[in-house]
């Protein structure tokens, strides 16, 4: 039998029509695509470039600060003009003298209160006021020479002396407070104690704010330390009021006064140790420079 012919027709591929217009949506201009890609890449790289510029600026400022300290000068030498530096130096001297006069009066009053009313907080404040007098004297020495206003070596020596004074004072404050806690010494409350605590707290906080402002402008760690000590004195002045008021209403909390004295002593001790650890190496690094003596 002969094979039956297939019903399916063999179709040959038709050549593409040359007159057919290509779809414009399909046609893509590589230049435009590359332009958009390059624009997107530039937008993505722009934040990285800004961050890199900021980091480079910070590195440059750190290098400048380090180079200034390497020359035995403080950062204030780059910020202040000579007449501005001398003006702020005189203000620091005036504030130090005012602080000495005020804190001597407050120390005498606080010692009187601590003896008459058996207050560990008042004794701690009296010792802190004495410390404030010594720290202000050190600041006076620090800025007594006009030529040494930017001297890093003189600054670091003043801070080392302050650190030693802080440690010795903290030991005395904690010793008195621990003794009062061990003997269960009860504080006596009256109007004289209140008035001394309020006046002491306000005066010390005002002095602290002024010292902080001058210390920031002159980039002086000694002035900032003196301001910290005044601030601590203000806190202790108000702590006398708080502990006395608490004891007046809750006699069972008699130990609050001595506890505050111990805490203040620990804070002063920690600050003094930190100051020595930071400043002793710097004194050695800058000892070869002129000391403006």
Image (cartoon, rainbow, N blue to C red):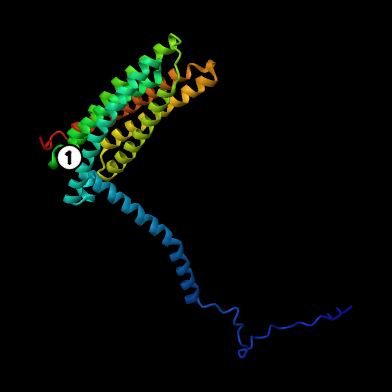
Identify the residue at image location x=49%, y=76%: 32
Query: Could you tell me which quadrant the N terminus lies in?
Result: bottom right
Question: Which of the two residues, 106 or 167, is positioned nearer the viewer here?
Answer: 106
Residue 162 visible (yes or no)? no
Q: Quadrant of residue 132?
A: top left
Secondary structure under tag 1 reads loop
Residue 112 seen from this side: yes
Q: Nearer the viewer, residue 125 or 8?
A: 125
Residue lying at 36% horizontally and 54% vertically, measured from the top left: 54
Q: Residue furthest front?
A: 191
Q: Which residue is mark 1?
A: 151
Measuring from the top left, give residue 96's x and y in whole percent: 24, 35
Which residue of the protein is positioned furthest toward the right in this rendering?
Answer: 1
Q: Is residue 51 above or below residue 11?
A: above
Q: Is residue 223 left or right of residue 235?
A: left
Task: Please state, as top left, top right, bottom left or bottom right, where the C terminus lies in the image.
Answer: top left
Q: Position of residue 37 (x, y in %)?
A: 48, 68
Q: 281 or 10, which lies in front? A: 281
Q: Which residue occupies 36% across, 15% down?
A: 115
- On screen, residue 53 above or below 147: below
The furthest residue to the top: 183
Q: Position of residue 176 (x, y in %)?
A: 36, 15
118 lies left or right of 1: left
Q: Quadrant of residue 92?
A: top left
Instruction: Give the percent coordinates (x, y) of residue 171.
Output: 33, 18
For the residue pair 4 and 185, the one nearer the viewer reads as: 185
**Label 1 Cα neighbours within 10 Å, binned few <14 / some 14-19 / many ≥20:** many
């Amino acid at each position: 039998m002969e094979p039956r012919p297939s019903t399916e027709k063999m179709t040959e591929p038709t050549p593409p029509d040359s007159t057919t217009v290509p779809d414009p949506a399909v046609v893509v201009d590589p230049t435009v695509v590359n332009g958009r890609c390059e624009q997107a890449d530039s937008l993505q790289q722009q934040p990285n470039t800004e961050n890199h510029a900021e980091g480079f600026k910070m590195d440059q400022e750190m290098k400048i600060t380090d180079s200034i300290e390497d020359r035995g000068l403080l950062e204030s030498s780059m910020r202040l003009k000579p007449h501005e530096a001398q003006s702020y130096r005189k203000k620091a001297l005036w504030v130090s003298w005012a602080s000495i006069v005020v804190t001597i009066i407050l120390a005498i009053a606080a010692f009187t209160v601590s003896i008459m009313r058996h207050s560990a907080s008042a004794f701690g404040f009296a010792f802190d006021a004495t410390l404030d007098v010594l720290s202000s004297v050190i600041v006076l020495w620090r800025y007594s020479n006009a030529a040494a206003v930017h001297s890093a070596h003189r600054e670091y020596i003043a801070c080392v002396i302050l650190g030693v004074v802080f440690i010795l004072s903290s030991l005395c404050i904690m010793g008195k407070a621990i003794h009062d806690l061990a003997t269960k010494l009860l504080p006596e409350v009256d109007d004289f104690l209140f008035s001394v605590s309020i006046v002491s707290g306000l005066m010390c906080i005002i002095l602290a704010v002024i010292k902080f402002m001058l210390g920031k402008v002159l980039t002086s760690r000694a002035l900032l330390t003196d301001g910290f000590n005044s601030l601590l004195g203000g806190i202790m002045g108000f702590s006398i009021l708080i502990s006395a008021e608490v004891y007046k209403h809750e006699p069972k909390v008699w130990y609050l006064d001595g506890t505050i004295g111990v805490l203040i002593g620990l804070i002063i001790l920690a600050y003094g140790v930190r100051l020595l650890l930071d400043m002793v190496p710097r004194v050695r690094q800058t000892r070869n420079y002129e000391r403006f003596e």
